[in-house]
Image (cartoon, rainbow, N blue to C red):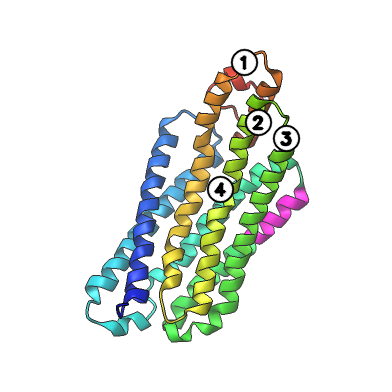
Amino acid sequence: MGAFDETVGVLLIGILFNTFLYGLVVYQFLVYRSTKFNDPLWIKCIVGTLFAVDTLHSAVAAYSAWETCVTNYNNPASLAVISWTIPFTAVATSFAAILTQFFLGHRVYKLTKSKPIVGVIGLFSLVGFVFGCYSGVRSGIVKYVANFTPLNPFVICWLGFQSAADLLITFVLSFVLFRSRTGFRKTDTVINRLIRGAIQTGLFASLFALADLCNFVLHKNTNLYAMFAYPIGRIYTNTLLDTLNSRIQLKLLGANDDVSDNDSKNAYKMENGSQTFAGVQTIDTKFAGDV
């Protein structure tokens, strides 16, 4: 193993993977923009804001690679100093997380009508956001990797509450949708697709957040945590855009249903309500109707 595999090497892996995910974000954003979804303004604002944050953060990540490999080439001492790109990553990731969790929390409310559940999700998300921003700012003040230890409680709270919100959203959506299964093939096809999307909603972000946390706490003299920290924001944005763009496939599923199959039509209407919120219609109201 080389001398810089666990510092420069893993950092570059995280940045390269982040760049790949940003490419997916751009593709999904273009699909969303080119499809005439009848979404309310607040959803469009969230999508636009997340895309802008992702673009800025991906540019910062590319600069981080340049700073590490070019500007500080043959300067190993620079690895002991915290670059401003690390605090920026923590704040940008926390911002992407709270926006996505707010969006998905609203989806949970439309499906469950449960204010206590949504309140817990909102509390977890808000606490994670506050600790994430604080951890980012504090890491910039600390400046040196050797002084990271006092940050442990704040990073644990940040990523712990953030992951808890993601997993709670995933569990609630999966549970509610699973209980909606009817046994009819056409109905369950739509519901199974929604369950799969619900599982994807929080699973990947939670896995990366927990991996980031474990490596930050256990491997302080490496940049292993950065390999997972950089892509988390792109995972959140891809989750949100996939949730919105999946309506295209689900519309096709609804279009292929037999119009006389009332259960199938009702399932598609349920999906329409869960995906677009607040009575927003899908692209083609011929199959979905008003919700």
- Which residue, given by chain and number where applicable, does mark 2 sit on? 188
What is the secondary structure assignment of the residue under circle 4? Answer: helix
Badge 4: how crowded within 10 Å, few (<14), some, or many (20+)?
A: some
Q: Which residues are magenta?
A: 115-125
Residue 64 seen: yes
Q: Is residue 227 left or right of residue 41?
A: left
Magenta region includes residue 123: yes
Residue 171 percent location from the top left of the image: 68, 50
Residue at image coords 38%, 44%? 26
Residue 38 seen: no
CB atoms at circles 1 and 3 under 8 Å apart?
A: no
The type of residue carrying mark 1 is Asp
Residue 271 percent location from the top left of the image: 63, 32
Q: Earlier in the sequence, mark 1 or mark 2?
A: 2
Disc 1 to disc 3, C-alpha distance: 20 Å
Question: The N terminus lies in which quarter of the figure?
Answer: bottom left
What is the secondary structure assignment of the residue under circle 2? Answer: helix
- Which residue, given by chain and number where applicable, does mark 1 sit on? 258
Q: Quadrant of residue 127?
A: bottom right
Q: Earlier in the sequence, mark 2 or mark 3?
A: 3
The type of residue carrying mark 3 is Ser
Task: Return the mark for residue 200.
Answer: 4
Disc 3 to disc 4, C-alpha distance: 19 Å
222 and 155: which one is in front? 222
Q: Main secondary structure of the magenta part?
A: helix
Quick check: 105 above or below 177? below
Residue at image coords 47%, 86%? 147
- Which residue, given by chain and number where applicable, does mark 3 sit on? 180
Q: Is residue 123 left or right of residue 53?
A: right
Comparing marks 2 and 4, which lies closer to the viewer? 2
Disc 1 to disc 4, C-alpha distance: 29 Å
